Amino acid sequence: MDQVWANRAASAEAAVTQRHLKRLWALPGTQLGVVAWPSSRRDRLFGTWHYWWQAHLLDCLVDAQLRDPQPHRRTRINRQVRSHRLRNNFSWINSYYDDMAWLALALERAARVVGVQRRRALPKLTDQFVKAWVPEDGGGIPWRKQDQFFNAPANGPAGIFLARYGDRLKRAEQMADWIDRTLIDPETHLVFDGIKAGSLVRAQYTYCQGVVLGLETELAARTSDDRHAPRVHRLVAAVNEHMAPSGVLRGAGGGDGGLFAGITARYLALVATTLPGYTAADVTARDTARAVVLSSAKSAWDRRQTVDGLPVFAAFWDRDAELPTATGRPAQFVEGAVTSSEAAERDLSVQLSGWMLMEAAHRAAAVSSLG
């Protein structure tokens, strides 16, 4: 069955690479993802580019290289990394800690899995996260610089990165403990969005659950501390009960929300493949995570549209995809977030999420509960 998902992941990769990958400003040896398809001239000129979407594009390319190693893809990964820095004014850094955390995760995997190294990038990004830690202000690390909003979307991915890179397990554990102490809903056991100037922001997004699952799973696998696996068990059960109606992860539209469910699927697949242990609770968590990924992927695939033989995924995986057109309101950057295009399927984020889901299904299908 994992070969079926490998084929579907390959189709999703082909759809994104053929429709969205373009040279940056026509420069040789460059490539970024155009943020919409069909695209406007401004999109193709990378007047908009969305730093964190490009980080997830890089992460998906690394997924694909793990699934099916190819020399041409390594070249593509190298171009994506080079062009990200170029488009970001020759810098890895921006004002948003969540953005930088997503890039750090993708760059660490590109180096470790593919051998595409940028030796100065990861130490610089690590420094950003370590210095942003402010327990005296109620954090956590903040969402962005000069801000008092401490949230799961910044602390979760930064924590996963620090668990994986540079011997920073202790800080990663402190971040996980801060989330567990501060942001867990005592009723549903889901993760709240964050805390702002001491007040809880009670929104509950799928990707907040995903990044906390990723962080706690990494820590369960990398430490001998027995507090992390039970947090994974509890959160997998909560996601299954509250965020996967009929077994399909809940969508969040286009724009930035287009990436939310894909991120959740990525880290549910990490639970399925990486959570250690053979207690009944460990096996149940892995089996449940795997089942949610596979049922979401089956629904998303069944409800796709097809153009030139390649998929167009829906923003909501339990609904039929809508074919996007070049007309209608485009996605816009408003107060630190990207809103949806009128047809959410037009957004690169939505198509990346579908691709991420297919890669997650391939990984999840390859393991049994005792694998």
Image (spheres, rainbow, N blue to C red):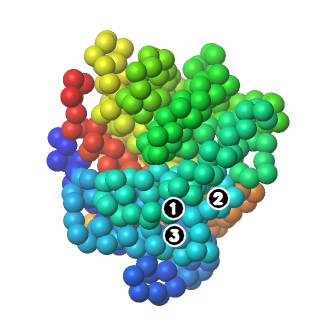
Quarter-of-image position of residue 99: bottom right
Cα separation, mark 1 vs mark 2, equals 25 Å
Q: Is residue 47 above or below residue 17?
A: below
Quarter that holds the N terminus: top left
What residue sits right under mark 1 in the picture?
Answer: 121
Which of marks 3 and 1 precedes in the sequence?
Answer: 3
Which of marks 2 and 3 precedes in the sequence?
Answer: 3
* 277 lies left or right of 243: left
Q: Which mark is residue 84?
A: 3
Closer-to-camera residue (367/28): 28
Residue 23 seen: yes
Tell me the SS state at disc 3.
helix
Quarter-of-image position of residue 294: top left
Residue 321 percent coordinates (x, y): 43, 54
Task: Give, as a three-letter code, the residue at label 2.
Answer: Val
Task: Give, as a three-letter code, the residue at label 3.
Answer: His
Residue 191 percent coordinates (x, y): 60, 29
Task: Give, as a three-letter code, the residue at label 1.
Answer: Ala
Please rate how many residues cluster around mark 1, counting C-alpha atoms within 10 Å: few if below 14, some from 14 to 19, many from 20: some
